[in-house]
Amino acid sequence: MGESYKVIAEVFEIRSEPGKQPCSLYSIGDKFDLSDMEDRAKLCHWAFHSMLPFWSVLRFGGTLPWEPDPDVAYVACPDPNNVVVFKLSRTREQEEKAKDE
């Protein structure tokens, strides 16, 4: 397997429909290291599955042509009433290899 990079998901924005409570799972600025299984487990499944394809691109050195910064992607969870926008940022730090690899 080639190089893989650490990617951090940060809560960038929280939106809610008028009269609805915003998502209570996160606060603006919360950060999750997607390389860390324990951090990934703190994300709701809807949010994680929304960011999975973008994480894969950034993790393995790819870029998204619509993003002006090649190391960043913005992803929103699919909850239509309580949208949480995450900023995924690729660091230049290599992911640690699993001990059994």
Image (tube, helix red, strand yellow):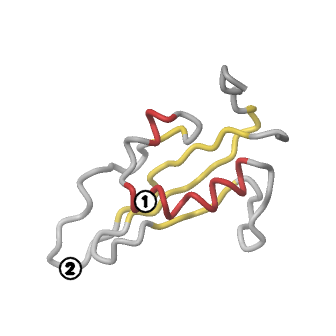
Q: At 63% across and 60% down in the image, what residue appears?
A: 54
Q: Residue furthest right?
A: 2
Q: Is residue 5 above or below residue 88?
A: above
Q: Are marks 2 and 1 in contact (CB under 8 Å)?
A: no
Q: At 45% across and 63% down in the image, what residue appears?
A: 85
Q: Residue furthest front?
A: 100
- Quadrant for the N terminus, please: top right
Rendering coords of residue 5 (x, y %) = 73, 40
- Quadrant for the C terminus, please: top right
Q: Mark 2 belongs to which amino acid?
A: Pro
Rendering coords of residue 61 (x, y %) = 80, 50
Rendering coords of residue 88 (x, y %) = 59, 53
Task: Specify whether 100 is left or right of 87.
Answer: right
Camera-nearest label, 2 or 1? 1
Q: Is residue 17 above or below residue 69?
A: below
Q: CA distance from mark 2 to mark 1?
A: 21 Å
Task: Specify whether 79 is left or right of 35.
Answer: left
Which label is found at residue 14? Answer: none
Rendering coords of residue 89 (x, y %) = 64, 49
Task: Specify whether 77 is left or right of 51.
Answer: left
- Badge 1 density bin: few <14, some 14–19, many ≥20, Cα 10 Å: some
Q: Is residue 101 above or below residue 61?
A: above
> Which of the 4 image quarters holds residue 19?
bottom left
Residue with the mark numbered 2 = 18
Q: Secondary structure at mark 2?
A: loop
Total marks placed: 2
Q: Secondary structure at mark 1?
A: helix
Residue with the mark numbered 1 = 47
Q: At 67% across and 56% down in the image, what residue appears?
A: 72
